[in-house]
Image (cartoon, rainbow, N blue to C red):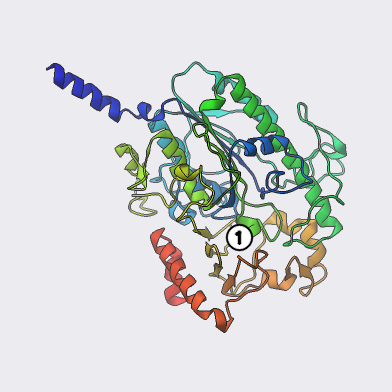
Amino acid sequence: MLQRSILCLLASLLLSPVTWADSKNIVFFVVDDMSPDTGAYGNPVIQTPHLDALASDATLFSHAFATTASCSASRSVILTGLHNHANGQYGHQHDFHGFESWLKVRGLPILLEECGYRTAQIGKLHVAPQEVYRFQEYLPGNARHPVAMADSCKALITAEDDRPFFLYFATSDPHRGGGIDQASPYKPDLFGNLPGGKARAGLERIDYDPADVIVPPFLTDTPATRAELSHYYTSISRIDQGVGRLIKHLKDAGKWDDTLFVFTADHGMAFAGAKTTVYEPGLRVPFIVRQPFIETRPAWNHAMISHADITPSLLDFAGGYDADKGFTKHPDSRKLGPTRPGDNRGPKKYDRFHGRSWLSILTETEPEGWDEVGASHTFHEIQMYYPMRVLRDRRYKLIWNVAHRQPYPFASDLWAAASWQAQWEKGEDAPYGTKTVGGYIHRPPFELYRVATDPTESENLADDPDHASILDDMKARLKAFQKDTQDPWALKWQYE
């Protein structure tokens, strides 16, 4: 009888989700529309001392990719480990756009709750429905004031609670907002900065001379572009202060040395040529991971990772990821979520994540087997149907523009941007970065770039006879990616 009782006790302990966590906290800090623009990523102009200090004590990924450069769709991938074409969040969640994930999907906060975590969210969420992405706590905070957001998290961090916490911290910076209304001098500019050099209480205002900013190759160097980049930089410096304040609260509470801290962006900067595209400036993101329980932290990790890897990695840290099966250890977590009567949308089962855990490679610089990523974009706003699928490896990148017969649609904020309008007004032959205005709007069915030697994606090799075999190989691998991730658009290969 005693032996049986001991066995039952051991079984209950092994099955208890709380034992997986072992007081390992998780902070996931995601910003809105930011490219790898920090000092640690090589920008000598922008002031990001807190992010640079974090990077010096963390793993810095050089090849991190969003899977779609659209806010809601990207965040759904972050929080499910499934490409948006499989989780249902094809585009924006808010207003009349109305996209949301299938009810049967089970999001990261729910999975971590089942691992014994207390879960909290602050700032921008931008995914739905709540049944999929439910947090236990929703903390108040101005998403344009990262320092105030960090202060709102102090009670969560210092709470007397034996459970570890998962904090999803999401700023609206440096997303574009509305333009300055001259009749109301208190409205922010395009990147959320108060006009007239005003600073929000508790934040230092850091302004940049447009003459000093670095214009990336995909943009055209004009006064309008430089002015917008200077505002973008100011918004990033605001984020940096929020990172510093949040880390201070973790250290003051004695939580820093048992907290996994991840910093990234939902996708690249909010400029035409980046956001809503699958070009490199749209998909490349900063990605910094401080795993507190490892001693070796190389300066760089060159693995090719994507946002689909985030959910399995965080679950792996929590002890709830089965690397062999590619899904959660907790049997109940593998069940489908709720459905409404008659609602049979989405895949019939979710038996594994589309990504995998990078937790075991954080101490490596050149890990093997991390040499390919896929991307999937379908919508941004509801009027912006333009499905694109991507396969990218170390040497080449293939883009399939499924709806190539129609002109490329613009996000409303990017269309109105002075950086785009200045070139649009000059006509289709005007340059826009390494392309022309007309070439940016009217795209071929396939774009093949040798990114190893052409990182600006300036020469399309899809029609080059010398690259025909490479194109065929990339197409075959793209089809395999679509089949593997249950992409409905794979049918397009058969009749278009």
Q: Nearer the viewer, residue 382 or 219?
A: 219
As drawn, 326 above or below 199 = below
Name which quarter of the figure residue 174 lies in.
top right
The type of residue carrying mark 1 is Gln
Name the element at disc 1: loop
Q: Nearer the viewer, residue 96 or 119?
A: 119
Q: Mark 1 highlights which residue?
A: 383
At 75% from the left and 61% from the top, the residue drawn is 219
At 79% from the left and 51% from the top, the residue drawn is 228
Name which quarter of the figure residue 111 lies in.
top left
Does the rendering let one see residue 144?
no
As drawn, 177 above or below 50 = below
Q: Residue furthest bottom?
A: 465
Q: How many marks?
A: 1
Disc 1 crowd rating (10 Å Cα; few below 14, some 14-19, many 20+) is few
Q: Residue 302 in the image: state x and y as whole percent.
A: 56, 52
Q: Nearer the viewer, residue 341 or 115?
A: 115
Q: Residue 76 in the image: state x and y as whole percent.
A: 51, 47
At 63% from the left and 72% from the top, the residue drawn is 443
**Image quarter in which the N terminus is found:** top left
As drawn, 43 above or below 332 = below
Q: Residue 247 in the image: state x and y as whole percent.
A: 63, 28
